[in-house]
Amino acid sequence: MSREIQDEDRTGKELIKKEREGRRKEGKRERDRRKERKKERRREGERKEERKK
């Protein structure tokens, strides 16, 4: 294989790796956001319960 083709192949693989990493980080952020919303809803529910008492 010529040097140019090897370089192109390598950059393609690096791009794919970066894309995957980006998606992984994006997924983690989304999960974190969902957890925060869940906690917030629970807190609001507890506040409502206290008001009823």
Image (cartoon, helix red, strand yellow):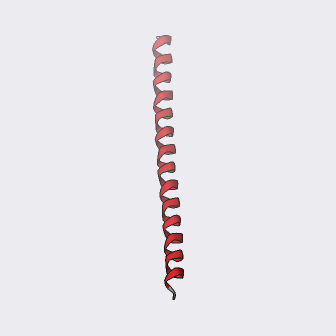
- Between 16 and 29, the residue placed more toward the observer is 16
Q: Nearer the viewer, residue 43 or 27?
A: 27
At horizontal 45% and vertical 14% (from top left) the residue drawn is: 50
As drawn, 15 above or below 6: above
Residue 26: where, in percent of width, then height?
51, 49
Residue 28 lies, with reference to residue 46, above or below; the image says below
Q: Residue at position x 53%, y 66% from top?
A: 16
Give the image location of residue 9, x and y in percent. Answer: 53, 76
Choose between 44 and 25: the one closer to the eye: 25
Residue positioned most to the bottom: 1
Residue 20 point in image, percent of width and height: 51, 60
Residue lying at 48% horizontally and 11% vertically, measured from the top left: 51
Q: Position of residue 23 (x, y in %)?
A: 52, 55
- Residue at (50% x, 80% y) in the render: 6
Residue 37, placed above or below residue 11: above
Please state the total of marks drawn on the protein image: 0
| The one of 21 and 39 positioned closer to us in this rendering | 21
